[in-house]
Image (cartoon, rainbow, N blue to C red):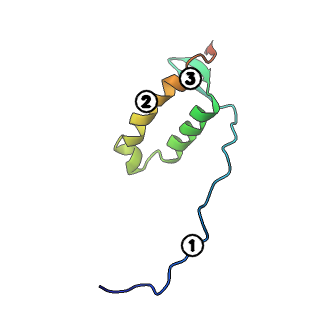
Amino acid sequence: MTSYWKRLSHNGVAVPEPYLAEGLKVKVRGREVSLPPLAEEMAYHLAKKKDTQYVLRNELHKGLRHATPRLVQGREVRGG
């Protein structure tokens, strides 16, 4: 076996700052819905990966399709 490194080191686990919600609203069936912070974070996550194979293969959509209705349930829906 070929050895490529003599030593491997790292600086520990990287933990990102918590997501700060911005009050994102989306249109659902023509009505504006305010997203709760977790659903908003998921929407931004999807948008960042929009044209990648991860999204194009529909893996991310499956999870969001099942989680989002539960997250937005009971939110105020306004006519739009």
> Residue at left 59%, top 34%?
38
Tell me which corner region of the image, top left, top right, bottom left or bottom right, holds residue 43: top right
> x and y percent of residue 2 in the render?
32, 86
Query: In the rendered structure, which amino acid carries the disc numbered 3?
Result: Val
> x and y percent of residue 8 in the render?
50, 79
Q: Are marks 3 and 2 in contact (CB under 8 Å)?
A: no
Name the residue beneath numbered marker 2.
65
Q: Nearer the viewer, mark 1 or mark 3?
A: 1
Q: Are marks 1 and 3 in contact (CB under 8 Å)?
A: no
Name of the residue lying farthest toward the top: 79
Q: Is residue 47 above or below residue 67?
A: below
Of the two numbered discs 1 and 2 on the same chain, state the one appearing first in sequence: 1
Gap in angstroms between the C-alphas marked 1 and 3: 40 Å
Residue 72 numbered mark, or none: 3
> Residue at left 51%, top 23%?
70
Residue 57 numbered mark, or none: none
Of the two numbered discs 3 and 2 on the same chain, state the one appearing first in sequence: 2
